[in-house]
Each structure stands twice: as structure tokens, then as C-alpha cells.
Image (tube, helix red, strand yellow):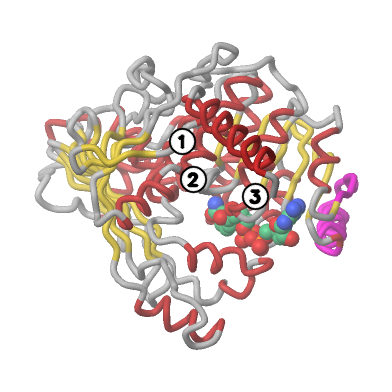
Amino acid sequence: MHSHIRLSLCLLAALASLSLNARPKDDYGYRVRNGVIVYNVPSRPSDQQSMLGFACDPIPNVRVGFIGLGSRGPGALKRFAHLEGATITALCDLLPERVEAAQVMLDELNIPRADSYSGEEGYKELCLRDDIDLVYLAVPWQLHTTMAVYAMEHGKHVAIEVPAATSIKECWELVNTAERTRRHCIMLENCCYDFFELTCLNMAQKGVFGEVVHVEGAYCHNLDPFWDKYQGDWRMLFNREHSGDVYPTHGLGPVCQVLNIHRGDKMDVLVSMDSDAFRGQEIADRRYGKGACKYANGDNTSTLIRTRKGKTILIEHSTITPRPYDRMYQIQGTEGFANKYPNQGIAIGSSLAPDLDIEDLDAEHYMSAEARDSALVRYQHPITRTGDLVQLAKKVGGHGGMDFIMDYRLIYCLNHGLPLDMDVYDAAEWSSLVELTEVSITNGYKPVLIPDFTRGEWDRTDGLQFAR
Ligand SMILES: NC(=O)c1ccc[n+]([C@@H]2O[C@H](COP(=O)([O-])OP(=O)(O)OC[C@H]3O[C@@H](n4cnc5c(N)ncnc54)[C@H](O)[C@@H]3O)[C@@H](O)[C@H]2O)c1
């Protein structure tokens, strides 16, 4: 290579690095300071505004484009077929045969066929249409952010399956794009809508547990029957490459709502620790050939989080060893306690729940099943008291009905021009654990400061509210 060409290339490289350094908003990296991992929080560009409390004009009929019609997507179609205020306008999958199978499903549900898109980039054509309000994504994790950003940039609201993002960079891309385009970006965290969780949230908000001091959540689900079903092996490949809690949001979402995260409190610091990949490696050896790869994801990953207001959260991830399904869901307060798995149990002192009219309440023992059931009725969350919504949800199904309640709430809020129950900061905060736990583990289990995706506004909203 001629020396002057080499010189110009060096100059270009130097200029490129200078311009990168001059734009801190593009720096999504971290540094280790005094043994603590600290991420850069990029400042908000001047053309963006906070999405806290964001609402848009009412959309009486929400026209929806569905992307991803594998295991999860078709269930959403079935639920939307039972929702008033929404129309299934377009369907898209990489594989045309999956789009056709979904069209047949629409025939069986007695609703008109939608327009079809397929191939790697079919989603772009769908997003370019101007008669779609909401793009509903049920694709592999690796595609969530790219597709969501594209949809928002083309004027669509987006609903993204869990986790919404797989890295801190992607979390910021979702936040920045939602703030810039003023589009809703909601993560479809269905576990926030399970009946016990909603009722306990209501109890916590009414002070029945006293001050909530510690909460727990998990995704413990042996995926042996499912590993072969993911298109292109996307899930095993992600687990193979990454340690950490790669699927944190089912555990984290419901308990963050109890703690009013970014609505008065903030997740401040976490430490994550994993076991070795004993069974994970065994399965990878069988699947890809002995010694073909090192399986990164530990069989069990535990993460402890402390909040700015002095509360603690324990989150677990375990998908590879045989064990009963468990999302933990536990709330410990100064006056009471609730626990979901393996049996739903509540323990509270009588002074805190005078409405219950149950004798001999004692916070050191679970109340009887009869007393618990009457407490669950007494404190049923307002959003599940709407007409025959619960019966319909249980009939339509989707994890026992919680998926239907989630979709119902999304469409209800869009129909009425209300803020959504979960915003882009929830999506970013809950998904951020994917990278943050991996970084804690791979740096020798170091504490990691959790970035503030609201950029200083975590205390601006006074508690979580579901708009009605
Ligand atoms: N909330 C829940 O309870 C729950 C349950 C299951 C799955 N999920 C989530 O749903 C998502 C999908 O999971 P799944 O089990 O259905 O996986 P899957 O592999 O069965 O389905 C993914 C689909 O996306 C399609 N796809 C891939 N590339 C595409 C592209 N470029 N354009 C359009 N379509 C493309 C695939 O062909 C496939 O049909 C994941 O994010 C997963 O975490 C959530």
C-alpha cells in the first residue's frame, strides 16, 4: 500500500474515533470504577422528549400488523379475534407457509383474511403501509429492537414480545426512538396481568403489606420440550453464547410494579451469580457434537438488586434443569407477605386489613385457603372487574387468561387515548438485565450500577397507575 494512502486511512480512523468521542450519546459502554461497573448514561438529544405519562390521540379502531407467526404469534391472533376496537390488518413471517397457516386460522375464527408479507425483509413492507397503527412483534429476541425501531420510525406504535432488547445499546435505541418519534413502545410482559399478581399489586398499593421491603421473581421453566421448536434454533444459540439472566422480565415485571420502579423508586445496583453450565453443556454436546462449543449460560442464575429507596429484589433464571415451573413472585412487607409458587399464600396482620373481616389474622402464618380466597376477591384489581372480562379472558385463554387481559388493556388504552400500563422505560429497565447480569458475571460477579433510562426522572411520577 502506498504510504500516502496508508496515512489517509490512519487520518480517517483517527477522525472517526475523535467524532465518536465527541458524541457521548453514542457511548453505550461501561467502565470499572473502584470495583463497581458504571455505564455511561447518554444525555437526551435536544429533539427528544420524555415519554413518561405519554398518551396519543384516541384510535377508535387499532389496525394491527403482526410480525412473527411461530409458536407465540398465532395465539395473539386468536386473542385479537375476540377484541373489540382492533382489526388484524397484516400478517408477516419469514416463512410464507406460516403466514398461510395464520390466514387459515383467521378463516376458522370467521374473520376476514389480512394482507400477507414474508421473507427476511417483508416486515419493512408491512411497516411502510400507512393504514397500520400498531406493529405486534413475536419474533426471535435478536430481531426485536431492529424491527421495533424500524416500525416506530415509520410512524407505528410497537408492542414487543419479551425481552424487548438484548443489550444496553438496544435498550437505548428503543428509548431514543420512542422519545424522538413519540410512538408507544410497550413490552408485552404478560405476567404483569396474571390474576394473583394483579390482586397483590392492588393490596400492596392499598398498604395491606405495610411497607414492601423485599420482592422476588423468577423464570424457572425447563425448556426441554421446546428447544427444537424455535425457528433456526435462535433461543439455544443465544443461551449458548451468553451467560446471565437472558429472560429476566417475567420475574422482574410484576415485582417492579409493586415497587413503583421509575414511578418513585429506581433499581440502583445489581450483582449476579451463576452456576456452571452442567446440564447446558451436556445438552450442547449432544446437540452440536462433543466439544463443538462451550455453553455459556449457567444452569441457574441468581441476581440481587437494591433500589434507591432501600428495597431488595431477587431474580432467578433456570431453563435447562428438570424442575417444576416457578415464577416465585413473592412480596415481603413490614406487615404482611404474599407468595405464589408452589401454592398461593397470603399472611397479614389484622390491623392492616380491617376490610377483610377475618378473625385471628396473624402475619406469621398463611391464612386459611378460605380466608385467602375471600381476600383475593375483596382486593381484586379494578381492571379485572370490568364486566365479564375475566370470564372472557379465561375462555379465550393464553396462559390462563393473563395474555388476553394484557392485549385488552393495550387496545383499551389506545382506543381511549390513555397512557399505556407499561412504557418504554419499563421495557428498557426490565430488558437491561440481559446484558447487566452477563457483565456482572463475566467481570467476577461485580456490582453493576443500573443505568437510569428516564435520565433523572425516575422520581417524577407518583406511583404506578393503570389508566381508566
Ligand atoms: N410472553 C410469553 O409468555 C412468551 C411465550 C413464548 C414466547 N415468547 C416470546 O415470543 C417471541 C417468539 O417466540 P416463539 O416461541 O414464537 O419463537 P418461534 O421461533 O416459534 O417463532 C418466531 C417466528 O419468527 C419468525 N421470523 C424469524 N425471522 C423473521 C423475519 N425476519 N421476519 C418475520 N418473521 C421472522 C420465524 O419464522 C418464526 O415463525 C420471543 O421473543 C419469545 O421470547 C413470549
User: According to the image, label 3 marks what residue?
Assistant: 143
First-in-chain label (3 vs 2): 3
Question: Please, what is the three-letter code of the amino acid marked with disc 1?
Answer: Tyr
Q: Tag 2's secondary structure? A: loop
Residue linked to disc 1: 28
Q: Does the CB distance between marks 1 and 3 fall below 8 Å?
A: no
Q: Is residue 197 above or below residue 100?
A: above
Q: Nearer the viewer, residue 304 or 403?
A: 304
Q: Quadrant of residue 192?
A: top left
* Badge 1 element: loop
Report the Cα–Cα distance between label 3 and label 2.
Answer: 12 Å
Q: Which residues are magenta?
A: 97-117
Q: Kindly indicate whether the residue at mark 2 contacts the one at mark 1 (C-beta within 8 angstroms).
A: yes
Q: CA distance from mark 1 to mark 2?
A: 9 Å
Numbered-mark total: 3
- Residue underneath mark 2: 167
- Label 2: how many residues lie within 10 Å, few (<14), some (14-19) or many (20+)? some
Q: Is residue 101 magenta?
A: yes
Is 257 situated left or right of 13 in this image? Answer: left
Query: In the figure, is residue 35 to the left or right of 100?
Result: left
Of marks 1 and 2, which one's residue comes earlier in the chain?
Answer: 1
Image coordinates for residue 221, horizontal then vertical, percent: 43, 66
